[in-house]
Amino acid sequence: MLTPGDSDAILIERELRAAGSPARAASSQSYLKSTRDFSGTTAPDVRAIVTGWRRAHPDLTRQQLIRLATALWERPLFECKAAAAILLTDRRRLLTADDAVLVEHFLREAGTWALVDGLAADVMGSLVTRSPELLGFLDRWATDHDFWMRRSAMLALLVPLRRGELSNWDRFAGYADAMLDEREFFIRKAIGWVLRETAKKHPDLVADWLAPRVHRTSGVTFREAIRWLPAARRDALLAQRASGRAPSRARYP
């Protein structure tokens, strides 16, 4: 028996499969190291199909959004899950704090950056910004056994930090410090990513945080973190890392 949202999910899946190719499906499966079923639909085509459906339904309600996103997510095709993530991202303003449970469910099942990152940064990030009581979710995720959840905790703070808003800088910094010694690439990359984006507006803040941790920081984290720093600060951190010395107390312009 079809549930509300299933009929639209079936139609969207048909479009996704029609736009795909076996060669691209095999390539995507290999690239993402996944055993999921792929249609081989390109990311722009997935977005175009979702956008086409969305424009045909301008009066979409929160309930309809949740039903369709859930129906798409429950289908085995990877691109259906990607379509669900795009749909939630595009209509994230319809979501409420109650929907954080659903977002967490999706994140726990995602298993790849290609699904996790948008759900964490854009969807959960929007919910947390509008409903700060949800920060408790992130605190819990930051110590989760699943590294994708730990990554999500940090990425959910990315967009405000990128804009220069520092209300949750200390929270991110605490998460990052606790995870700095982890060997998981996707954790190291996430720390560097958020530091890099924060440095675009607040380079000295990032440099000051990084200086006493420069020898604990992995190569990928360090390279990302210093990318937007002023030359003087970047060069000082590079020299410190190369020499093994403790951070200097010198003031920088």
Image (cartoon, rainbow, N blue to C red):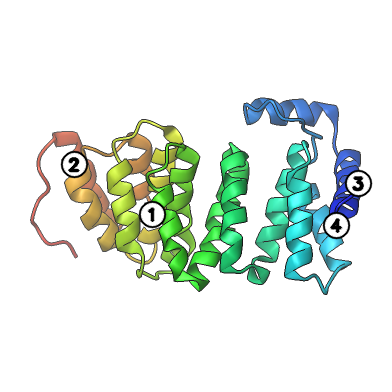
SS of the residue under disc 3: loop
Residue at 89% x, 67% y is 56
Q: Is residue 198 above or below residue 37?
A: below
Q: Which residue is mark 4?
A: 4
184 on left or right of 236: right
| Of callouts 4 and 2, the N-terminal one | 4
Label 3 close to label 1 by CB (< 8 Å): no
Q: How many marks?
A: 4
Q: Toward the viewer: 6 or 151?
A: 6
| Of callouts 4 and 1, the N-terminal one | 4
- Of circles 4 and 1, the one toward us is 4
Where residue 250 sits: x, y (%)? Answer: 9, 57
SS of the residue under disc 2: helix
**Spatial separation of the CA atoms under disc 2 and disc 1:** 34 Å
- Of circles 3 and 1, the one toward us is 3
Label 3 close to label 2 by CB (< 8 Å): no
SS of the residue under disc 1: helix
Residue 8's disc is none
209 on left or right of 166: left
SS of the residue under disc 4: loop
**Spatial separation of the CA atoms under disc 4 and disc 2:** 60 Å
Label 4 close to label 1 by CB (< 8 Å): no
Q: Mark 1: which amino acid?
A: Asp
Q: Mark 2: which amino acid?
A: Ala
**Spatial separation of the CA atoms under disc 4 and disc 1:** 34 Å
Q: Which residue is mark 1?
A: 139
Q: Which residue is mark 2?
A: 239
- Of circles 3 and 2, the one toward us is 3
Q: Toward the viewer: 213 or 63?
A: 63
Label 4 close to label 2 by CB (< 8 Å): no
Residue at 73% x, 46% y is 73
Q: Which residue is mark 3?
A: 1
